Image: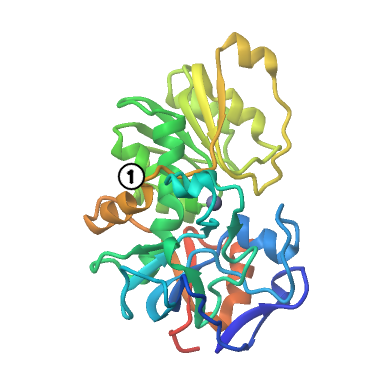
Amino acid sequence: MKAVVQHQFGGPEVLSYEDLPDPTCGADEVIIDVEAVSINRGLDFGARRGSYNRPVALPHVLGVDPSGMISEMGSEVKGWATGDRVWADFFLTCGRCEACKSGQSRACTETGMLGVTRHGGYAERVAVPARNLHRIPDRLSFAEATVIARHFPAAMYLIEERAAIRRGETVLIMGAMGGLGSACLQLAKQAGAIVIACVGSEQSAEGATDLGADYCVNYREEELLQRVLEITDQRGVDIVCENVGDPTIWKDVFGSLSMGGRLVTAGAHAGGIVELDLHRLYLNRISILGGAGVPPDGIERALRLAEEGQIKAPIAKILPLAQAKRGHQLVEARQTPGKIVLAPKLSN
Ligand SMILES: [Zn+2]
């Protein structure tokens, strides 16, 4: 099969489109003929550079969120059939420990990650455990399912469980046209919030407005804090959704919170080490809440909302798999508002 392989760690140039033997299918696994897989700034770039906090064995194949059709099934797999349209969750569990057996697989003690600790979906075929599969509704394309299932469940966890958003609250979304940010934006609007989208380009401002943002602030051209205070009559916002962690604008981000405000965060691709004003934190009763996770029903719920047309996958471009390197360069250069999806069956 064709796959995008990296034999060393580094920039986009280490990604090589080449032949690789087909994956073998374990007894509890299926083979997916990949139709779509997205480029993820956090996970893919970390694994590609060798800087992610999990060891990556070389040669490696990236790709954390493949979707496609089942083409082969292991002897122990039940409930699926070849030809089923599926998305694979990247969070790999052992299936044997107490947590897994009691249905609390997110607390599994022997976790791995598809596309990080084992070969992922930047390939024509990928092997995944059957317990990681989710069915894609007929009305969703593979590209849409990949983007929706990858980001919306994580956004639900941040917005619903951590921030516990309420109707009428004001929310500042950082990186509002990123994968997670654009999902938080749409969920916040669905919850009846007033959304201020923080973006870095005119293109992204247009994208965020299309997704329902009430206000957009381009932090490269405007003073973020000043604009937020103007928009909120000097009150500040109730919630900030962070997933950028940029130390150069953190002061404005943190300063945007109102009395009793909550900042929820998952992701820190712009650095993540910031200076925290503890005086402001306690005097203003601010909460900072971390949250990498997904609600138990998050993936199914997100796919259903997308099928009903209530949320949209912000897809900037669909590229052939052979152009993975170019896709990484575009994402690295922040040239595209929305996600870039790789499609192995798209001709070069
Ligand atoms: Zn387990």
Q: Amino acid at mark 1?
A: Gly
Image coordinates of residue 167 in percent, x first then y, are 30, 27
Q: Nearer the viewer, residue 95 or 348?
A: 95
Establish if 219 lies above or below 66.
above
Question: Residue 337 location in percent, x, y?
Answer: 49, 58
Q: Position of residue 112 (x, y in %)?
A: 60, 58
Look at the image and tell me whether residue 208 can be seen: yes
Side (left or right) of 305 relative to 181: left
Would you place residue 312 above or below residue 171 in this image? below
Residue 175 makes an appearance in the image: no
| Residue 40 or residue 300, whichever sits in front | 300
Secondary structure under tag 1 reads loop
**Residue at the image position 29 percent from the left and 32 percent from the top:** 192
Residue at the spot of label 1: 212
Measured from the top left, where is residue 93 in percent x and y?
54, 56
Is 126 displayed left or right of 311 in the figure?
Answer: right
